[in-house]
Image (cartoon, rainbow, N blue to C red):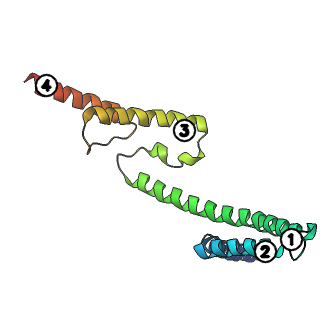
Amino acid sequence: MATKRSKGKHLSRARLFDKISTKLTHATGSPLASILAVCLIIGWALCGPLFGFSDTWQLVINTSTTIITFLMVFIIQQTQNKDTMALHLKLNELIASQEKASNRLVDIEDLTEEELTVIKKYYARISKLAAQEKDLHSSHSLDEAEDNHQAKSRQLKKKNNA
């Protein structure tokens, strides 16, 4: 019973952090936030003569910006991770729902860079095949591209020879 409660508390904390980080990310990415940041810097610069451009005056802006940057990195990263995961899941659903789509692309984000390069070469080949066909409406999966191209080429040759 205690584990269910601890999981529930963990989920509620995670949801709370998610909501806060999403709101903060949207707020800090707004034009108003940019204007406020510029005004803050201008205000700080204008205070320079009042404080004789002292080390303390410089330390205030350095410390403030460092703390804000440090915290924002984590907040923005959390929001970006969530958005990226949601996007991947949506794409996986689209791939899985298409009969002729290559299921090799589901969870492709987990592949190594070398594996992604291999798959990219397949898509480059599909692009070349599509360019040869000059048909904007044709599409191929990785698995059927070569077969479709050869079949279409044979049909075109038969047509031209007839």
**In this figure, what is the number of numbered marks?**
4
The CA span between labels 3 and 2 is 52 Å
Q: Quadrant of the N terminus?
A: bottom right
Amino acid on which the number 3 mark rests in the picture: Leu
Marks 1 and 3, the one that precedes in the sequence: 1
Q: Quadrant of the C terminus?
A: top left
Amino acid on which the number 2 mark rests in the picture: Leu
The CA span between labels 1 and 3 is 46 Å
* Residue that carries the numbered disc 2 in the rendered image: 46
* Residue that carries the numbered disc 3 in the rendered image: 116
* Residue that carries the numbered disc 1 in the rendered image: 60
Mark in front: 1 vs 3: 1
Amino acid on which the number 4 mark rests in the picture: Lys
Query: Residue at the right extreme?
Result: 55
Query: Residue at the top extreme?
Result: 161
Instruction: Tell me if 74 is positioned left or right of 148 in this view.
Output: right
* Residue that carries the numbered disc 4 in the rendered image: 158
The CA span between labels 4 and 1 is 79 Å
